[in-house]
Image (cartoon, grey):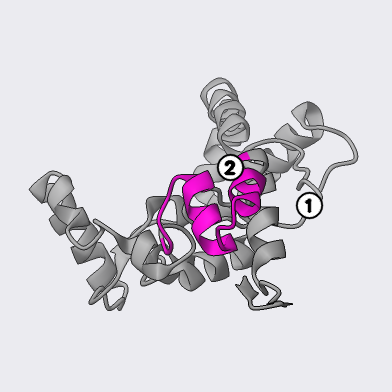
Amino acid sequence: MDIGERTIPDPHLDRHRAECERLGCVEFFDHLIEEGNNSGFAAMLAQRRPPGALGTDRAFLEGSHHWADKMWSNNAKDVHAIAKKAGISTQGKVYKGGLGKPNDHMAWVSGRDDVIAACKAKGLSSTGSVNYQSPAQKPQRIALADDIRDGYVRGILATEPKTREKVKKDPKAIKEVQERVVAKHGKKGSE
């Protein structure tokens, strides 16, 4: 900005320029700045979106107030009933299935901060109206998935009458069968 002979620096120029670089429109942004536009106006034109269109709770929740109307009525009722049974107040909140099941408090959000908190707590990343990159995590190694293990256990119980009788008498004996299956079919050195 020019006021007589003094030039007032634009405190937001670097932030707007960095955002335009990230979005790939920095050349147009620089052209608009050279023409004498302030950085906020230049960023709005270069990014082709008005101020507050990204990164605000208003923008995040836009159109979400009637989110349940977009579901089948039975599904919407079920989601709310599950939340109510879990003791969750849904007033002023929207359900985001990507964050958890309807009985999970963190899946019901009232703004961007709730989404970021849920992502941090669960080790999730988010892109879109809420951007958050979770820290890299070491993958959890398991020897054998439960459903695969249980399939082998069912096979053993179907083909080995002695084992089946032992499990009928003492249901805790199923653990021994499960351990035997994991020892035989699971990855070595896991867990």
Q: Which mark is residue 79?
A: none
Question: How dense is the environment of label 2, judged by Cα within 10 Å: few (below 14), some, or many (20 and up)?
Answer: some
- Taking the magenta stretch, the answer to whether it contains residue 36 is yes
The alpha-carbon separation of the residues under discs 2 and 1 comes to 45 Å
Residue 103 in view (yes/no): no
Task: Specify which label sits upstream in the sequence, 2 or 1.
Answer: 1
Residue drawn at (77%, 32%) of the image: 186
Q: Which x, y percent locates residue 37?
A: 55, 58
Specify the segment rendered in magenta: 28-52
Question: How dense is the environment of label 1, judged by Cα within 10 Å: few (below 14), some, or many (20 and up)?
Answer: few
Q: Which x, y percent locates residue 133?
A: 67, 54
Q: Which residue is mark 2?
A: 166
Residue 78 in view (yes/no): yes
The local secondary structure at tag 2 comes to: helix
* Left or right of 124 in this view: 182: right
Q: Which x, y percent locates residue 178?
A: 66, 40
Residue drawn at (77%, 38%) of the image: 143
